[in-house]
Image (cartoon, rainbow, N blue to C red):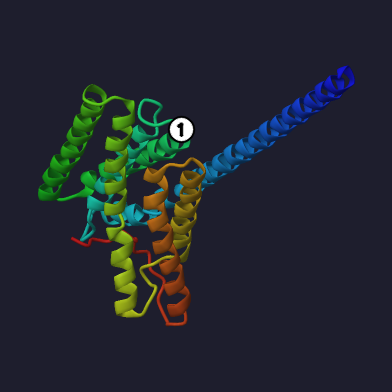
């Protein structure tokens, strides 16, 4: 009997050892997977920031022309206003007060907001009197809207609801900006020419959207991967159209992607 108890105790000890070893292995695998996820997320976020810079500098040829001619001609300043509102809301969404572990979203959108403010200031400087008043009014409305969003999200909602509120608004603002690529896609199909769809701009759009789509997936953030997933699809369509219509003879153009579509 004593011998049997000893054997049973030894078997229990071995079973407990195996259980603890299995638990430790699972813990190590889980930790390794977590580290890999974090690294992939950070790489995707940094890549998105880099590719976004290509988009931020894309209107420079347009403003060189505006400065050279000292006139905004038929160009619209509204795309830069839409982009400013989107950058402000998205940068707020990325802060720890709204969502967790989204600092790279705040950095890219903060830089984007600075670029849009510079473009808007230049546009107002060279715009006609009527356009100046209109732009001042719209920009004031943008900052007023953002202030209301800021106060409402802080005063009326706790952190989980605040994330859904600001996240939903950021998705709406970002999706509304797809009007520009859709306009260009329609123009390319209609004219059968890629004159107004620069390749590197389309490539930057695709790469940035794809990077932040991956970032949102790795961070399990629906408010990031859904709009950027749509942006990725539009980027694929743009690149596909570019390849398809590239054989069409075309002249070099310095016209921007964001030409007036009012």
Locate residue 120, reporting x and y percent: 26, 44
User: In the picture, which quadrant includes the N terminus?
Assistant: top right
Q: Is residue 120 above or below residue 253?
A: above
Residue 216 vs residue 68, the one in the foreground: 216
User: In the picture, which quadrant includes the C terminus?
Assistant: bottom left
Locate residue 187, reporting x and y percent: 30, 72
| Residue 36 in which image quadrant | top right
Locate residue 8, reporting x and y percent: 81, 24
Is residue 77 in view?
no
Q: Residue furthest right?
A: 3
Q: Residue at x 45, y 48 (%)?
A: 52
Q: Residue at x 50, y 49 (%)?
A: 214
Q: Count residues near mark 1 (Cα–Cα under 10 Å), then give few for <14, some for 14-19, many for 20+.
A: some
Q: Which residue is mark 1?
A: 103
Q: Residue at x 33, y 69 (%)?
A: 185
Is residue 123 in view?
yes
- Element at badge 1? helix
């Amino acid at each position: 009997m004593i011998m049997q108890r000893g054997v049973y105790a030894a078997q229990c000890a071995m079973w407990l050892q195996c259980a603890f070893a299995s638990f430790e292995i699972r813990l190590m695998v889980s930790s390794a997977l977590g580290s890999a996820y974090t690294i992939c997320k950070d790489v995707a976020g940094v890549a998105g920031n880099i590719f976004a810079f290509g988009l931020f500098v894309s209107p420079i040829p347009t403003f060189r022309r505006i400065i050279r001619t000292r006139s905004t001609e038929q160009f619209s300043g509204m795309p830069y206003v839409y982009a400013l509102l989107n950058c402000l809301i998205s940068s707020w969404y990325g802060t720890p007060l709204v969502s967790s572990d989204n600092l790279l979203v705040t950095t890219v959108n903060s830089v984007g907001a600075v670029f849009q403010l510079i473009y808007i200031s230049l546009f107002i400087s060279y715009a006609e009197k009527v356009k100046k008043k209109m732009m001042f009014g719209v920009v004031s409305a943008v900052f007023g809207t953002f202030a209301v969003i800021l106060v409402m999200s802080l005063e009326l909602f706790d952190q989980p609801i605040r994330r859904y509120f600001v996240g939903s608004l950021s998705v709406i603002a970002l999706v509304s900006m797809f009007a520009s690529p859709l306009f260009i896609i329609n123009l390319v199909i209609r004219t059968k020419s890629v004159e107004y769809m620069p390749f590197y701009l389309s490539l930057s759009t695709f790469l940035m959207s794809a990077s932040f789509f991956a970032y949102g997936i790795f961070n399990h953030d629906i408010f990031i991967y859904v709009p950027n997933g749509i942006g990725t699809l539009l980027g694929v369509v743009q690149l596909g159209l570019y390849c398809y219509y590239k054989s069409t003879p075309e002249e070099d153009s310095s016209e921007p992607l964001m030409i007036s579509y009012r």
